[in-house]
Amino acid sequence: MNSVDLSEVLLDEMVILDREPFKDKDDMFNVMTRQFETAGLVSDAGAFKKALEFRETLGPTYMGNMIAIPHGKCKEVLTPGIGFCRCREPFIYESGGESGEVKYIFVLAISENQENDYHLRVLATLAGFLAHDEFLALLEKAESYDELIKGIKEL
Amino acid sequence: MKVVAVTSCATGIAHTYMAAEAIQKICKQKGYKCKVEKQGALGIEDKLRDRDIKEADLIVFANDVGITKAERFTPYKDKIFQTKPHAVIKDPSIIFSEVEE
């Protein structure tokens, strides 16, 4: 990924591997937004959840291939970042009139100011990766955060 | 075949770049030349030149929000395939649905 270091936006504490499936999207939003707040990436989990929900009203964030990428942009995002969760089993994700089984979730926190271009660039790069089968295979097989980051660097 | 595309989406990050990648990937698989202009949170990236647009056999608009500088494409509107980034990500081959390959 050239000079971009993904570990700067995908923090260790924001990666959850092999979690129990979420009850539904709302359950997942609650868990993930709190995680963002705890990590200090957003100042208010509730406000960030509202931003995610607003984005849902604009169209589906279910991407097929068992992937969902809910994302939100609001002033409460202090540092742009990604949260990743891999569930042990898929759960039903409903989004913008579509629904499907989801096992891999990337939650993107996007800031409003333009000072974070570097981070936005990394988020954009990650979004591009999702179109590649090698990346999807890595998401399935990575057994630790380090393995995930290392695998991404080798793509 | 030469393909050019413009992608954009509501927040300017996720779908814009996923759709761009999906279009580039399918064109590469088919051996077509391809350039994709991204209109996202980082501004306009990989801006298409007038020559790219003129020479293209297929122009793909995969946008959720209005396209910036859309007038560049006006003389070639017969070549435009209009779709949504979400649709392209789920099935990139739809961009060829109205052209003879």
Image (tube, grey):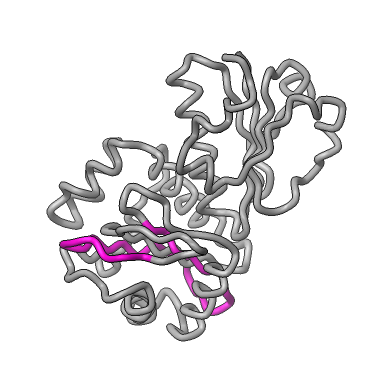
**Residue name at image x 52 percent, y 55 percent:** A120
Decide if residue B93 is on the left or right side of residue B2.
left
Q: Is residue A64 above or below residue A75?
A: above
Check if residue A82 falls in the magenta segment: yes
Which quadrant would residue A54 be assigned to in this image?
Answer: bottom right
Q: Position of residue B82 (x, y in %)?
A: 68, 38
Decide if residue B81 is on the left or right side of residue A144.
right
Q: Position of residue A152 (x, y in %)?
A: 29, 43
Magenta highlight range: A68-93
For the C terminus of chain A, give its image quadrant. top left
A93 and A51: which is toward the camera: A93
B41 and B6: which is toward the camera: B6
Q: Main secondary structure of the magenta part?
A: strand
Q: Position of residue A17 (x, y in %)?
A: 18, 62
A140 and A83: which is toward the camera: A140
Q: Position of residue A85 (x, y in %)?
A: 27, 63
Decide if residue A141 is on the left or right side of residue A139.
left
In the displayed orientation, state which residue is furthest to the left.
Answer: A143
Q: Is residue A96 above or below residue B28?
A: below
Which quadrant would residue A104 be assigned to in this image?
Answer: bottom left
A151 and B3: which is toward the camera: B3
Check if residue A54 falls in the magenta segment: no
Q: Is residue B28 above or below residue A29?
A: above
**Residue name at image x 26 percent, y 69 percent:** A13
